[in-house]
Image (spheres, grey):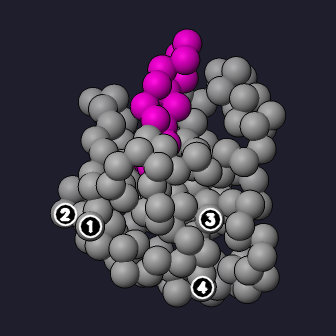
């Protein structure tokens, strides 16, 4: 399964639209947004991307009271803390924003998820900790380690590709 991972959009709908186009070109079947989506317009784009979409709210999303209504209207699965994507055979990917360091650490240490996705730091991360692969796609808005980026996870090959978005 190919999963598109995006985070820290902060309302940049134009850049999110370009990222979703790149996901479609790569045959992504599900899109996970790791929070700080920032606007109802971005939620609308996520909901209309042609793939199953889910969203974990970030610390900045709590300022936008209408985001959960936009998610419900657009068919985007959402939760304030974590969202999961079924991978088959009883396995799930979990995503959280990452601003709650204790929650992120518990998800990683718990070992029940083969993939833990997060954002918040605006820095790319692809690290294996024990049996868990931790993935941060970087950020679409103000990345701290280079160009705006997203990630594509191929669960069958167990590979992560970072994709720069201009």
x and y percent of residue 36 in the render?
Answer: 62, 65
> Residue at point 69% right, 60% down?
58
Residue that carries the numbered disc 3 in the rendered image: 36
Q: Which residues are magenta?
A: 125-138
Q: Secondary structure at mark 4?
A: helix
Q: CA distance from mark 4 to mark 3?
A: 11 Å
> Residue at point 26% right, 67% down?
166
Report whether 43 appears left or right of 62.
left
Residue that carries the numbered disc 4 in the rendered image: 40
Compare marks 1 and 3 and give the one earlier in the sequence. 3
Q: Residues within 10 Å of mark 1 (few under 14, many from 20)?
A: few
Residue contact at pointers 2 and 1, CB within 8 angstroms = no
x and y percent of residue 126 in the render?
Answer: 43, 31
Q: CA distance from mark 2 to mark 4?
A: 24 Å
x and y percent of residue 113 in the render?
Answer: 60, 30
Q: Residues within 10 Å of mark 4 (few under 14, many from 20)?
A: many
What residue occupies the far left of the structure in this picture?
25
- Camera-near label (4 vs 1) is 1
User: Which dot marks residue 166?
Assistant: 1
Does the magenta portion include 75? no
Residue that carries the numbered disc 2 in the rendered image: 25
Q: CA distance from mark 2 to mark 3?
A: 24 Å
> Residue at point 54% right, 61% down?
8
């Amino acid at each position: 399964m190919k999963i598109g991972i995006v985070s820290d959009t902060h309302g940049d709908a134009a850049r999110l639209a370009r990222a979703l186009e790149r996901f479609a070109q790569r045959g992504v079947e599900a899109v996970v947004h790791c929070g700080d989506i920032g606007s109802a317009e971005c939620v609308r784009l996520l909901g209309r991307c042609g793939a199953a979409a889910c969203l974990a709210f970030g610390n900045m999303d709590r300022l936008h009271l209408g985001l959960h209504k936009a998610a419900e209207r657009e068919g985007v699965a959402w939760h304030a803390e974590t969202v999961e994507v079924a991978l088959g055979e009883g396995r799930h990917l979990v995503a959280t924003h990452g601003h709650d360091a204790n929650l992120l650490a518990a998800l990683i240490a718990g070992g029940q998820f083969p993939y833990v996705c997060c954002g918040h730091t605006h820095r790319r991360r692809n690290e294996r900790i024990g049996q868990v692969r931790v993935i941060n796609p970087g950020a679409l808005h103000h990345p701290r380690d280079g160009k705006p980026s997203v990630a594509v996870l191929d669960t069958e090959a167990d590979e992560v590709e970072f994709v720069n978005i201009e």
